[in-house]
Each structure stands twice: as C-alpha cells, then as structure tokens.
Amino acid sequence: MTIANSRTLDSLDGRIILALDKDPEASALALSRTLGVARNTVHARLARLERSGALRSFSRRLDPAALGYELMAFLSLSISQTRTGSVENGLAAIPEVIEVHATTGDADLMAKVVARGTADLYRITNEILEIDGIERTSTAISILELMPPR
C-alpha cells in the first residue's frame, strides 16, 4: 500500500495498524510493548501515518440498532450529472444517510441508510427523491451484516 509522499507501508506499519484494529484505544506505549518496538518509534510511525492520511481520525463505531435504527439499506441513486452539488448537499442534510459513494455501473451513487423500520425507510426514500437532481432510486435491504467494517 502506498501512502502520501510515495512512501509505502512496511511490515512495522502493518503490525501497528493490525494492533490498532484489535485495540483502537491502545496508547503508543501499549503498542510499543505489544510489538516489542521503542515507544518513540511507534509514536513517530503513528504521526507519519496520520499526516499521510493512511490513518484516519479515531472514532467509535456505533451500532445504529442501539439508537432504534434496526433496518439498514443500500440505495442505488441515479442522478442528473449537472446537479451533483445539490445532490451531495441534499444527502448530507438527511441524518439517516450515513455513507455515500460514487459508483460505476447502473447507478451513479450508492447510499447507506439506516431506518427504524420499513415505513421509516419509505419516508427517507421519499425525502431523497425530493432532492433536486435525484432521478431514480433502487433499494436493497440488508438482512444480516456478515462482516463489519474493518
């Protein structure tokens, strides 16, 4: 994997990233002990990985079901190519839209949406369809998460 400034990740970077995946709250000292590497080395590597964008900012993963959003769906969105900005702004204004990707294939965008149930999903889908530039949607409901984000 190549990161900013054309520097590739080496085996120590990989070990640090894997250790952080297992324990996202691990300190540089804890990582140095786990990996058998000097604390200053781990600290410098973490700083470089953050500066380069290889490590994104820390955030806790929240289970939407714990907030009452028990349904997850993926909406394929076809948009007017001249209205991309208004579509992005409109989707960002809907709190139940938790992720959006530009895609290839039949749809232009793929939106990950959480809802309290099918009636709520219907409401959210209609709210999305009201956004200037959205031409059509197609919905797939997730029945089970087989592999969480990693």
Image (cartoon, rainbow, N blue to C red):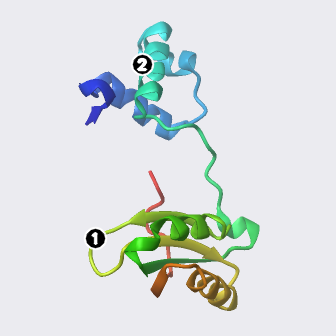
Return the x and y of residue 100 as percentages of the image width and height. Answer: 48, 65
Q: Residue 45 carries which label?
A: 2
- The answer to whether residue 52 is above or below residue 136 is above
Tell which of 15 and 48 is nearer to you.
48
Kind of element beneath mark 2: helix
Q: Say which residue appears at 61% left-offset and 33% top-offset.
A: 25
Kind of element beneath mark 1: loop
Q: Quadrant of residue 2?
A: top left
Give the residue type that dot 1 points to.
Answer: Thr
Q: Say which residue appears at 50% left-offset and 64% top-offset.
A: 85
Give the residue type that dot 2 points to.
Answer: Arg
Mark 1 or 2, which is nearer the eye? 1
Tell which of 22 and 88 is nearer to you.
88
Tell which of 53 and 40 is nearer to you.
53
Label located before the other in sequence (1 or 2): 2
Q: Quadrant of residue 132?
A: bottom right
Q: Which mark is residue 104?
A: 1
Return the x and y of residue 75 as percentages of the image width and height. Answer: 48, 79
The number of numbered discs placed on residues in the rendered structure image is: 2
